[in-house]
Image (tube, grey):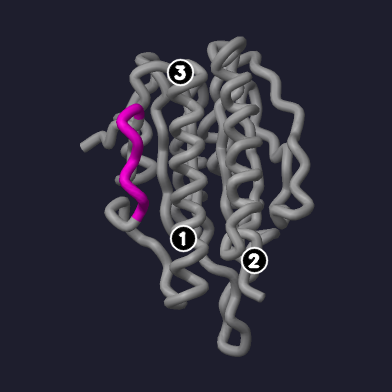
Amino acid sequence: MRKLPVYLLLDTSGSMYGEPIEAVKNGVQVLVSTLRSDPYALETAYLSIITFNNTAQQVTPLTELANFQQPNIDASGCTALGEALSLLANKVDQEVTKTTADVKGDWKPLVFIMTDGVPTDDIRKGLDEFRKRKFGMIVACAAGQGADTTVLKQITECVVSLDTADSATIKSFFKWVSASVSAGSMKVEETGKEMGTLSELPPPPPEVNIVV
């Protein structure tokens, strides 16, 4: 069976401490429970979580939804986004089955990045590694006023912003991510085609602004 890998890259730097990080934890719970009630997603979607602060770590390897366990996420330190992109590239190599002449591999991974700040490391090396891999949809979210959308635009065309990093707004973002993963699962199962553009995703809620 071909997996639809979904990678969440979550900023857990010190500025996310308090309400934002609690909202992210709740958002992940909502995401998983929503997708578990969707037969298409339950069949195909696999979820991994990579967090980044002083370093990047994969707190949840690529796991089928039925077996997903909520990781422990705390906020402290800096914003090593470049390292997170490098780690993502490595994990995709290990966890995602490539298509060959004989085997239909997994679908291209969907990637959702959320950060409330500016990278504190040099993202160029990570960005180079990241660009060498094939991804489906990549959505980057700038949460609150401290995030730099120009950096995120180097990673993907699909950048959204949240005016504030409070619990209601972050929850709206995760609900939209859930709907997007559901739409992607349904599309690959029913049509055998992958999502490639922002216009194919469900329309974002009012709290989520598309950055042009």
Residue 45 placement (x, y as % from top left): 61, 59
Secondary structure at badge 2 equals: helix
* Type of amino acid at the residue the image marks with label 2: Glu
Question: In the current view of this chain or complex, which residue is farthest to the left?
Answer: 212
Q: Which stretch did the figure color magenta?
A: 201-207
* Type of amino acid at the residue the image marks with label 3: Ala
Q: Residue at x 50, y 36 (%)?
A: 174
Which quadrant of the figure contains the C terminus? top left
Question: In the current view of this chain or complex, which residue is farthest to the front?
Answer: 37
- Quickly name the residue at label 2: 43
199 and 110: which one is in front?
A: 199
174 and 71: which one is in front?
A: 174
138 and 170: which one is in front?
A: 170
178 and 212: which one is in front?
A: 178
User: Up-down: is 75 above or below 89?
Assistant: above
Q: Is residue 101 left or right of 116 when viewed as pictured? A: right
* Type of amino acid at the residue the image marks with label 1: Gly
Secondary structure at badge 1 equals: helix
- Quickly name the residue at label 3: 165
Q: Is residue 202 in the magenta section?
A: yes
- Quickly name the residue at label 1: 184
Which quadrant of the figure contains the N terminus? bottom right
Residue at mark 1 to residue at mark 2: CA–CA distance? 12 Å
Q: Dot 2, crowdedness within 10 Å: few (<14), some or many (≥20)?
A: many
User: Up-down: is 27 above or below 41?
Assistant: above
Residue 80 placement (x, y as % from top left): 56, 27
Q: Is residue 212 left or right of 19 when viewed as pictured? A: left
